[in-house]
Image (cartoon, rainbow, N blue to C red):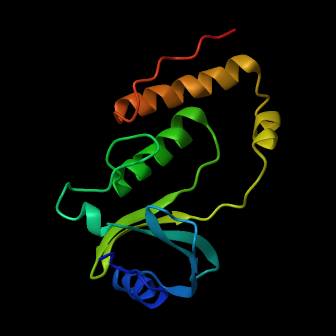
Amino acid sequence: MLKMITTESAGDALRECGYRIKHIRPISEGSNHYVFDVILEGDRPAICKFAKTRETEEGLSEGSKDTLFGGTLSLEREAYLFRMIKAQAKVPTPEVYGIHDSSCGRFILLERMTAFPRKNVWCEADFLKRRFLTVWNIWARILRRSRMLPLQPLEIL
């Protein structure tokens, strides 16, 4: 049976790991995670995610499988990808506050960013076709390193 992470247990886990929270509410968007919208002390918005392990996956492997890209889902992989994208692609990416073990499970806490249209980022960064393709080539290298997909770099037109 799938272990449920409730709002109360997620709040307890955050406090157990030293976070002071003002508000927490569930977000029902995660297919691979229990996701919570959190306001930390100091009015810092954050996202807290606990990995889901389905009954059919228990005991089969160390982690859940990524049904979209392949490979094993892990909070470490997610944190690595966020940091890599931020450093190499110079694309606005949430800060990873930490990955923690708690009495109700492992979780990642991320900065919650305000949504904005991708086109705005391209305009502000003066994105040309060449730069756009460079970013996607960086993505391809990241994906290959994490063994998610055997992608070939895009050709610059």
Vertical placement of residue 130 versus 126, above or below: above
**x then y, percent, for residue 9:** 40, 87
**x then y, percent, for residue 15:** 40, 86
Vertical placement of residue 117 versus 143, above or below: below
- Looking at the image, residue 74 sits to the left or right of residue 111; the answer is left
Q: Can you say which quadrant of the picture contains the N terminus?
A: bottom left
Q: Can you say which quadrant of the picture contains the C terminus?
A: top right
Q: Residue at x 17, y 62 (%)?
A: 59
**x then y, percent, for residue 152:** 47, 17
Q: Residue at x 80, y 39 (%)?
A: 119
Q: Quadrant of residue 74?
A: bottom left
Query: From this viewpoint, which residue is outermost toward the front?
Result: 56
- Looking at the image, residue 22 sits to the left or right of residue 60; the answer is right
Q: Residue at x 39, y 48 (%)?
A: 66
Vertical placement of residue 44 versus 89, above or below: below
Q: Residue at x 52, y 85 (%)?
A: 21
- Looking at the image, residue 135 sits to the left or right of residue 73; the answer is right
- Looking at the image, residue 96 sits to the left or right of residue 107; the answer is right
